[in-house]
Image (cartoon, rainbow, N blue to C red):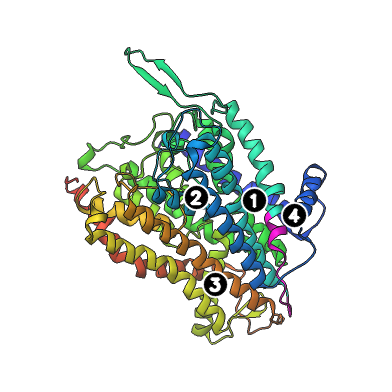
């Protein structure tokens, strides 16, 4: 690595640490109803929204009503996005006259965007009209991200409140997340991206003559507005097929840095919001530190793997599959961040990075997308591991398992285990199915361990609601569209439902004052225990699968053998 590369990495993580308390403090004001500087700007729109949907923002509900509202809203979103794809050719804003989308691809895409996965088995510029991109996908980019934040806020209230069954109002949390957090930040980022040359127009596709004398169709469209929320909402779905490797989405090194920053901005800051809302910013920083330790370790291993000499590539850093305007560091740093933060956007082909760097990308997702993770989703996933850590540590030292004054009992542990098992089931069972079936193997472009990694990565991405692809796998088939869609649903709602049950149960408990027998959760010892539990659970569950894919491919690569 050269000095500019080191500076880029240091500046990136330094800015994240600096911005976290600033944005985190602002978001805590948004969700506690404290007056903040955006109220005069969007306060009228918030009131109008409540009046339009006939919701009383002051009325709070229990966890079952909160969850019912969440599921109903997401089901309506699924049906709407599904239908507009099936009738795309008859809808406006379709200057390229694109045909209707097949039913199985429409199903996959609808599930993908309501679950904040944004897996894309299609090429955006040749499959979806401007209408579907804006009214369908961009809207879901906002509300699916807001849904994840709402679940986190409900869980936070469940932990911080006592002797109640009230967790807030889903519609209020959804509205405030969208209007006061996602929308303002998206406007600012979209303007910055347009300034860097990102496309934002409604022009029809242009046909130009290249220097070689051939004719090429250049896609146009309102890209910058969708790209801003795809990064800030940890969505990841690209306006164009090449995602953020496309020069119309990500033209310069500065736009690349901005988009990477946007991916991590809200998930990192929510840790501080959590700390403020539970009454202990130290708890927020503890969670932030555990996440950052895992992210820095993954980044270091990935960069080392990419810059290390190996006989297969002539002992040179490999640029195949990467953009020269970003280089190795800019590409590998993005791959680590996007898989850790459940974004799924890419600026390089993950199949082209070294096996160990590809394995880190998989591990980030296999750990439950808790290394900051998706907006809201990463943090409530981390709370699941905190519950398991407190329970295990309590058994080890003979102390009553407690977290922030709430006793951790059998119900919470059962729900936490269910939340951990749901995505693990999808990854292992569906990968095994695809690896031995004709329908699953027919989409492979590579044999051997690399081909297995393509399948493993796809179902890992779906179950983790990440959405990034390893590339090389033709997933736009009936088999993959359906299985990946089912995997996304389980990976999203198979965690949300246990989390909401935990929130409801915790809210009804008393808060026990700290004593000499309380196991501390606000020190470096707990950070070490939490990281260890996350790695052990992930390692024991997925090491055999990783051994058949990236690990054996790494050993073969060092022996000069490729696939």
Give the number of the mark in front: 4 or 2.
Answer: 2
* Residue that badge 1 annotates: 20
Q: Which residues are magenta?
A: 162-174
Identify the secondary structure beneath mark 2.
Answer: helix
Q: Position of residue 254 (x, y in %)?
A: 54, 31
- Cβ–Cβ below 8 Å for labels 4 and 2? no
Q: Which residue position is annotated with label 3?
A: 498
Task: Give the spatial CA distance, label 4 vs label 1.
Answer: 15 Å
In primary-sequence order, the first of circles 1 and 2 is 1
Q: Is residue 425 left or right of residue 130?
A: left
Which residue occupies the foreground of this view, 463 or 510? 463
Quadrant housing residue 243: top left
Q: CA distance from mark 2 to mark 3?
A: 27 Å
Q: Residue at x 28, y 64 (%)?
A: 432
Q: Is residue 243 visible?
A: yes
Above or below 397: residue 33: above
Position of residue 177 measured from the top left corner of the image (x, y, whole percent):
68, 52
Q: Earlier in the sequence, mark 3 or mark 1?
A: 1
């Amino acid at each position: 690595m050269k000095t500019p590369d080191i500076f880029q990495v240091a500046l990136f993580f330094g800015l994240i640490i600096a911005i976290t308390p600033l944005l985190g403090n602002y978001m805590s004001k948004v969700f506690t109803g404290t007056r903040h500087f955006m109220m005069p700007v969007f306060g009228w729109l918030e009131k109008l929204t409540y009046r339009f949907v006939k919701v009383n923002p002051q009325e709070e509900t229990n966890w079952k009503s909160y969850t019912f509202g969440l599921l109903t809203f997401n089901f309506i979103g699924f049906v709407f996005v599904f239908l507009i794809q099936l009738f795309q050719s008859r809808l406006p804003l379709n200057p390229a006259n694109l045909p209707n989308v097949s039913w199985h691809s429409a199903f996959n895409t609808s599930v993908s965007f309501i679950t904040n996965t944004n897996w894309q088995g299609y090429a955006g510029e040749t499959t979806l009209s401007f209408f579907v991109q804006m009214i369908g996908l961009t809207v879901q980019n906002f509300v699916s991200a807001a849904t994840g934040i709402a679940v986190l806020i409900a869980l936070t209230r469940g932990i911080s409140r006592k002797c109640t069954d009230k967790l807030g109002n889903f519609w209020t949390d959804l509205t405030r997340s969208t209007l006061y957090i996602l929308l303002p930040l998206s406007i600012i980022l979209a303007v910055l991206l347009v300034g860097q040359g990102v496309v934002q127009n409604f022009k029809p596709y242009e046909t130009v003559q290249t220097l070689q004398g051939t004719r090429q169709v250049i896609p146009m469209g309102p890209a910058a507005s969708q790209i801003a929320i795809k990064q800030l909402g940890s969505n990841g779905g690209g306006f164009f097929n090449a995602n953020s490797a496309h020069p119309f989405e990500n033209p310069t090194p500065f736009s690349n840095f901005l988009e990477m920053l946007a991916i991590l901005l809200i998930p990192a800051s929510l840790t501080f919001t959590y700390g403020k809302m539970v009454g202990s910013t130290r708890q927020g920083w503890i969670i932030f530190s555990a996440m950052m330790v895992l992210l820095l370790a993954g980044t270091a291993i990935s960069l080392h793997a990419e810059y290390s000499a190996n006989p297969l590539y002539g002992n040179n850093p490999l640029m195949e599959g990467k953009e020269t305007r970003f280089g190795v560091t800019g590409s590998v740093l993005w791959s680590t961040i996007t898989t850790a933060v459940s974004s799924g956007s890419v600026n390089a082909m993950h199949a082209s990075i070294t096996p160990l760097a590809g394995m880190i990308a998989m591990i980030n997702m296999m750990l439950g997308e808790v290394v900051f993770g998706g907006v809201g989703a990463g943090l409530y996933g981390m709370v699941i591991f905190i519950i398991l850590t407190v329970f295990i540590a309590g058994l080890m030292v003979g102390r009553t398992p407690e977290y922030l004054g709430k006793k951790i009992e059998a119900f919470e542990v059962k729900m936490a285990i269910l939340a951990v098992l749901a995505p693990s089931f999808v990854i292992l069972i569906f990968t095994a199915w695809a690896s031995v079936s004709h329908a699953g193997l027919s989409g492979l472009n590579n044999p051997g361990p690399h081909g297995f990694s393509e399948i493993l990565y796809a179902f890992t991405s779906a179950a983790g609601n990440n959405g990034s692809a390893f590339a090389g796998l033709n997933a736009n088939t009936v088999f993959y569209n359906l299985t990946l869609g089912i995997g996304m649903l389980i990976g999203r709602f198979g965690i949300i439902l246990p989390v909401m049950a935990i929130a409801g149960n915790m809210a009804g408990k008393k808060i026990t004052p700290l004593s000499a027998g309380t196991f501390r959760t606000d020190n470096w010892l707990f950070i070490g225990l939490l990281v260890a539990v996350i790695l052990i659970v992930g390692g024991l569950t997925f090491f055999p699968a990783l051994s058949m894919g990236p690990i054996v491919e790494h050993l073969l690569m060092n022996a000069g053998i490729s696939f």
